[in-house]
Image (spheres, helix red, strand yellow):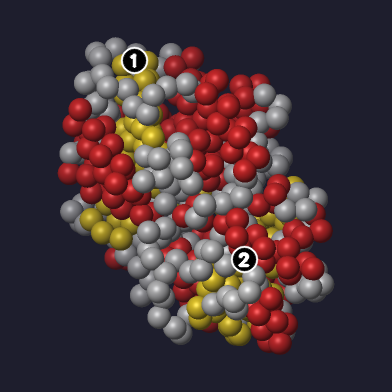
Amino acid sequence: MARPVFVSAKEDAKTTRMFQSSPSGARTLMINRRTFNKSLLLSALAAPAFVGRAAAADDEVVMGAILDLSGGLDIYGTPMLQMMQMAVDEINDAGGLIGKKVRLIKYDTQSNMQLYSQYAQQAALQDKVQFVHGGITSASREIIRPILGRYKTLYLYSTPHEGGVCDKNTFITGTSAAMTVKEPLKWAVNKWGKKAFLIGADYNYPRIYADWQIKFGKEYGATILGNEFAPLSVTEFGPLITRIQTEKPDFVSSALVGAAHMGFYRQWAAAGMLGKIPILSGSFGAGNEQKMLPADASNGIVAPRAYFMELDTPANKDFTARYYKKFGDKAPYVSDLILGGYEGTMLWAEAVKKAGTLDRDAMVAAMEGATYAGPAGTVKMNAHVHYAARDIYLGECQNQTFSVLETWKQQEATDAGDRCDLIKDPTTNQEFTPE
């Protein structure tokens, strides 16, 4: 077997940027859940890839969901669509929005970036939707964002990602890298020690995530002993594990992604390292890795996320009861990535109620400062950067479930720093990267 190639932060990144942002930028794990989700989608959300009615009727509000419902990324797109449909059903059952029913048009991009462009134009120009919620990877977001902006169709993106987007027409409820690094890394340094070894997948999100860890690590007096990136196809991690053992860090911070990279956790445990050197991971749990790995390969892994289904709050208990009632008691675990489909739709609904109209400029104004209190806590949109402030939870994996160790209230997306102020300069339209 050929020795796998790991790419250090000092080497030139040669990996394609096709999947450039979120932990969902790679094809991952859950083959058994894929089968369940497809059957659930057919029964609960049966619909063609898109519905070709030319425009909204006078008595309806039209929302577009542009997602990967087939292909390699459907394990994210399908359950996200289920969450959007659940939200729409609840909105309609409660009387709809401003006296109108919400109609959800579903566009299947088939994990094909070209179809994102095609369907964004169709949604805006032909179907004339008032709101688009969708995109999974940042690559897909950056394809549809300028199109929807050009045609003044309100857009919301709810996937955890690298941060830095600054766009008057775009609103983001998914966590940015800075939100899941600043306090969790401080916690790890204080609890485990100041020597850290960083590992991640070799594409944009993990690299930017590492940049934030290096930035905040300096503030906390941490020493970064290694900063290694593995291509998404790598399955053999023996050489990397050997190097970590040699460096003897106080903890490992992981941004590994996808089915192939689950091999690291199995090999780490097989080498007797689980429990000897703790792991903090900003990506673990996004694809329900805790359900796919056995307990003896995942116990003790700590992950900062915007939501855990185990949250012991009245709002979350109410949500999970409604979720299982709708989809059955064997419905899959809902991660923060998947919950984003529900949560983002509900936040938009609150803004429409506040605006009292479907006029795009009025909806934009209402979204700036819109608040939704749901199963993950309060989500409040920041008018200056169009990112939602939200609670971040630190969960420890034990026996394939998470228990919450810490909660940081209303964390802000500081990724763009003072470079993004859409109140002062609403014409700003770009994605800022760490300085």
Q: Residue furthest bottom?
A: 246
Give the left or right position of residue 100, taking residue 299 as reference. left
Nearest to the observer: residue 49 or residue 173: 49
Tell me the distance, in whole angstroms, between the alpha carbons under discs 2 and 1: 51 Å
* Element on which disc 2 rests: loop
**Residue in view at x 47 percent, y 74 percent:** 211
CA neighbours of label 2 inside 10 A, class few (<14), some (14 to 19), many (20+) = some
Q: Specify the quadrant that holds the N terminus.
A: bottom right
Where is residue 135? Give x, y as percent.
Answer: 39, 44
Lower sequence index among marks 2 and 1: 1
Relative to 281, say whether 112 is above or below. above
Q: Specify the quadrant that holds the C terminus.
A: bottom left
Q: Which mark is residue 235?
A: 2
Relative to 61, say whether 385 is above or below. below
Nearest to the observer: residue 348 or residue 105: 105
**Residue in view at x 48 percent, y 80 percent:** 9
CB under 8 Å between discs 2 and 1: no
Do we see residue 34 in this rendering? yes
Q: Which mark is residue 217?
A: none
Where is residue 421? Give x, y as percent.
Answer: 28, 58
Where is residue 158? Give x, y as percent.
Answer: 44, 45
Q: Which mark is residue 100?
A: 1
